[in-house]
Every structure is written in structure tokens, then in C-alpha cells.
Amino acid sequence: MPCQAGELIGSKCLDCDEVSIPQREICPVCHSHEIEIENFSGKGELVAYTVISVPPVKMAEAGYDSKNPIVSGSLNW
Ligand SMILES: [Zn+2]
């Protein structure tokens, strides 16, 4: 598991340079399939975050809830 190994793995679109964490198979901006896996340093400035304690159905099925919330953030690096 990447988190347990201390790694931050995402993807980068080779057509528009959009970066996604977690990694995606299709670019969310230009919908390109030209994606490469990136291993990020994990260093950056946290500019915003949110705690989601009522998750979407699939995330709730994976064990997320108000006692185990999802945290999502935006970084500048
Ligand atoms: Zn793209």
C-alpha cells in the first residue's frame, strides 16, 4: 500500500500536465488517456482542506464514516 510505504503516488497527464492524486486512468481536464504514474515528494503548501464525514456510497462501503472521515486537500508545490 502506498500510504503505508510513505509514498504519495498520483498521475500526470502527458497532454495538458494536469496532476491528480490519487492516480487516474483518464485526465479529468482534457480526458486524455496519455497518463503517467508520478511518485510525489509529499512536500507542498496546504491551501485548503475539507473533512467529509458523510461519504458517497462507495466510500461508505469501503469503511469511511463520521468516525473514519475522508480528508481531501489542495496543495501548491
Ligand atoms: Zn489532460
Image (cartoon, helix red, strand yellow):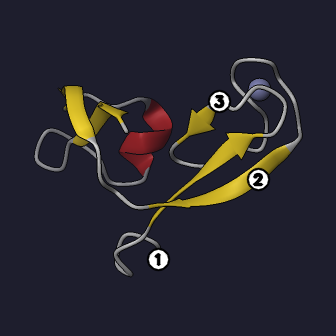
Locate residue 5 relative to residue 69 in the image: left or right: right
For marks 1 and 3, the one nearer the N-term is 1
Given this view, does label 1 or label 3 mark the residue nearer the observer? 3
* Residue 24 visible: no
Mark 2, ligand 1, within 8 Å: the answer is no
Q: Which residue is mark 2?
A: 36
* SS category of the residue bearing label 2: strand
For marks 2 and 1, the one nearer the N-term is 1
Considering every residue shown, the one lying at the far top of the view is 29
Which amino acid type is shown beneath numbered disc 1?
Met
Q: Which residue is mark 3?
A: 18
Looking at the rendered structure, which numbered label has been put on residue 75?
none
Q: Residue at x 20, y 42 (%)?
A: 69
Q: Which residue is mark 1?
A: 1
Quadrant where the C terminus is found in the figure:
top left
Q: Residue at x 33, y 54 (%)?
A: 63
Mark 3, ligand 1, within 8 Å: the answer is yes
Assign ligand 1 to one image quadrant.
top right
Which amino acid type is shown beneath numbered disc 3?
Glu
Q: Residue at x 88, y 41 (%)?
A: 34
* SS category of the residue bearing label 1: loop
* SS category of the residue bearing label 3: loop
Q: Position of residue 36 (x, y in %)?
A: 76, 53
